[in-house]
Amino acid sequence: MEIYQLRAYVTVARLGHLTRAAEVLHVTQPAVSGQIKALEEELGIALFDRKPGRIVLTRAGERMLPEAEKVLEAAGSLIARARALQGELSGSLFIGTVGDPESLRLGSLLNGLVSALPLLEIKTRAGDAEVLREAVATSSLQASFYIGPNIPREVKGLPLQSLQYRIVAPFSFSQRILHAGWREIADMPWIGAPATSHAQTLLRDLFARQGLLPNIVLESDHSSAPQTLVRSGLGLALLREDVAVPMAEHDQVVIWPHTRVTALLSFIYPKAAEHDPAIVAALSVLRTVWGLPTR
């Protein structure tokens, strides 16, 4: 039984009209009918007598209505109390970030948290994925965005988005790269990243599966540097597909067509913090920001 089903039942009972109830609830008439039907099936009784042009409560529907109204009232009180408690929550919340803030929708998350928890001091800390993972696992950091093959076992997390990465090379490498095999690709000059970064972890694992090591000639610790360095002709790099494809379309780089690396962007937190009010609030805001279903 869902609250929205009870709300549909009570609204139709009060208005005596499906179309008007749908307008009040901001849903379609079939949606209201479906919600009431599902509630009737779960309760095992008919709540309404449906006749051409009108809908009226059955005797059972009339007797159940006060109880449904009490449940809705209690749910409203619970929500109001939760909102009040949100406003009282204080302290600090430190969130680790990886990559660029825009791809994390960080601004929307922070805006939602500030609105929901006005007394909570929120701070962000940019860092490499594996450093942040270890900090979360040891509870020295309350939460963090994380990019990797999956959510690490030693923490809990909310999956946000699947990411695709591609091998890209300077456009001047076009003739060399398109027909190259794994060994030829590995031997070409590569732009690497710190060992604890998600980009380097994904690159290392990719070539390890082939029994190879990429020829790293330059290491950069700036997240946006690889695309600039590839475009300037220094070497190959692993770039997010949404970054690589537009560059390739403008003949700034060339994409090696024979592989694609899948990773997961997630929001991780210590297992012991699953019921921490700040974490619960952050997860709620994240689900809204990313359009994820509620639990």
Image: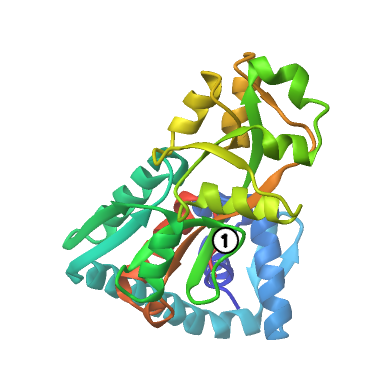
Left or right: 89 with respect to 52? Answer: left
Residue 25, x across and y down, in percent: 52, 55
SS class, disc 1 = loop
Q: Residue beneath label 1, please?
A: 293
Of 246 and 51, nearer the camera is: 246
Tell me if residue 218 comes above or below residue 214 in the rendering: above
Image quarter hosting the N terminus: bottom right
Residue 156, x across and y down, in percent: 49, 73
Left or right: 151 with respect to 108? Answer: right
Residue 40, x across and y down, in percent: 69, 77
Q: Dividing the picture into quarters, in which one does residue 117 lie?
A: bottom left
Residue shown at 47% from the left, 53% from the top: 195
Q: Residues within 10 Å of mark 1 (few under 14, many from 20)?
A: few
Left or right: 117 with respect to 281? Answer: left
Residue shown at 55% from the left, 75% from the top: 153
Residue 29, x across and y down, in percent: 66, 52
Q: Amino acid at mark 1?
A: Pro
Q: Total marks drawn?
A: 1
State whether residue 87 appears in this view.
Answer: no
Of 69 and 271, nearer the camera is: 271
Residue shown at 62% from the left, 59% from the top: 149
Residue shown at 48% from the left, 82% from the top: 66
State whether residue 88 appears in this view.
Answer: yes
